[in-house]
Amino acid sequence: MADNRRRLTLFDFFLLSASLVCLCLAPIPASAHRRKLRFGVDGEFKILQVADMHFANGATTRCLDVLPSQKAHCSDLNTTVFMSRVIAAEKPDLIVFTGDNIFGFDVKDAVKSLNAAFAPAIASKIPWVAILGNHDQQSTLTRQELMKHIVKLPNTLSQVNPPEAAHYIDGFGNYNLQIHGAADSSLQNKSVLNLYFLDSGDYSSVPYMEGYDWVKTSQQFWFDHTSKRLQREYNKKPNPQQGVAPGLAYFHIPLPEFWSFDSKNATKGVRQEGTSSASTNSGFFTTLVARGDVKSVFVGHDHVNDFCGKLKGMNLCYGGGFGYHAYGKAGWERRARVVVAHLNKKRKGKWENVKSIRTWKRLDDQHLSVIDDQVLWSDSAKGSVAPRL
Ligand SMILES: *[C@@H]1O[C@H](CO)[C@@H](O)[C@H](O)[C@H]1NC(C)=O
Ligand SMILES: *[C@@H]1O[C@H](CO)[C@@H](O)[C@H](O)[C@H]1NC(C)=O
Ligand SMILES: *[C@@H]1O[C@H](CO)[C@@H](O)[C@H](O)[C@H]1NC(C)=O
């Protein structure tokens, strides 16, 4: 008996240590990280952008800037309901949260608020990613802790930072995603659409440069390096492709170049407030245009601007405010931006590379109205010259 028990205890100890080691080594969440994103059999890939939820504590957190008649029955839960409805209506392939996911100043527990804010995306089982705005860290978690929590949530493809750049890159929540060609097509193993997510920071800590943060040199270097690596993979055998696959970039704080547009010369959408960019221009717009793969930038931050404008071949698009605890404009519906990329169909009816990228917005009204449908880019567009490697 005694012997038996001792052996059992030792064996138990062995099992416990083994399982602890396994737990520590297990990539979390294994299934989501291994999931390869690819175009559907319909030749489409659709992305839903959710900008500025400003989620706080749920039912007890009241709405800002709604009509007097809406005030009494409006809380964070309306943000949740809107998200469930728009996900059901659009059935996107990826959901992107572009920061100010939670409004730190009013948040009691950042973990609880984040979990509640992302809950409809998690429940949908659709892959999703998040980056940070300037308000997410203003409660119980730092920016690094926020991203470390986010990457552990179910079905997310978010990353704290790319492993190869983690030692030099500024911020938390810089990464890219590759969208592969349709299954059973010649490009099924190639990334035909590249997504870049960047941490545009919160507030400048540099003396003499007050105001909002910007995409730092280290991040621009990582972007440039990654874009070139992806182009080399796109161009190499088997099935070598010409030029560069189109890309889309998502971050929170607008580039100063967003100032280039008003409601009249934006391609679609409106400007109803200024652009709260950094007080200094860090040159990311130049870096993007010079590299040439990114066709559109998508930001949040200025909730009542929802335009797309085109400057030097680059689309600069606002998402438009989504959340009810975020400032907005009473009577001007909360909204979300949808982006769809379509593939070319060429030889033998098989899908190939990306043909066009379009966008529209969904309003949180009775019928989730679709507005401002527009083509952002198509492969026949002038100036889609292969950038030099
Ligand atoms: C918020 O949700 C409540 C409860 O469903 C609803 O009655 C109200 O109309 C919603 N408010 C807005 C502004 O959508
Ligand atoms: C893609 O990769 C899979 C698995 O390695 C392979 O079986 C398939 O033949 C590849 N397809 C193409 C078109 O390269
Ligand atoms: C849009 O119009 C404004 C005001 O007239 C002007 O300052 C700006 O340069 C224009 N932008 C573009 C991209 O043409």
Image: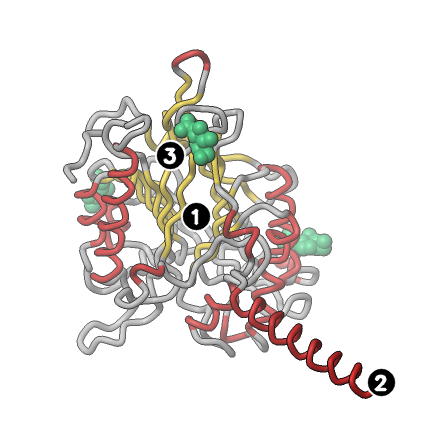
Mark sitting earlier along the chain (2/3): 2
Query: How dense is the environment of label 1, judged by Cα within 10 Å: few (below 14), some, or many (20 and up)?
Result: many
Q: Position of residue 238 (x, y in %)?
A: 32, 28
Q: What's the residue type where badge 1 is placed?
A: Gly
**Please, what secondary structure does the residue beneath circle 2 have?**
loop
Query: How dense is the environment of label 2, judged by Cα within 10 Å: few (below 14), some, or many (20 and up)?
Result: few
Residue occupying the point 55% across, 73% down: 110
Q: What's the residue type where badge 3 is placed?
A: Lys
Relative side of 62 to 195, left or right: right
Q: What's the residue type where badge 2 is placed?
A: Met
Ligand 1 within 8 Å of disc 1? The answer is no
Query: Which residue is identified by label 2?
Result: 1
Query: Which residue is identified by label 3?
Result: 190
**Circle 3 or circle 1, nearest the eye:** 3
Residue occupying the point 19% across, 29% down: 385
Q: Position of residue 98 (x, y in %)?
A: 44, 55
Any mark on residue 319, and which?
A: 1
Any mark on residue 241, and which?
A: none
**Circle 2 or circle 3, nearest the eye:** 2
**Please, what secondary structure does the residue beneath circle 3 have?**
loop
Q: Position of residue 33 (x, y in %)?
A: 50, 52
Mark sitting earlier along the chain (3/1): 3
> Which residue is nearer to you in this view: 165 or 60?
165
- Is residue 188 in view? no
**In this figure, what is the number of numbered marks?**
3
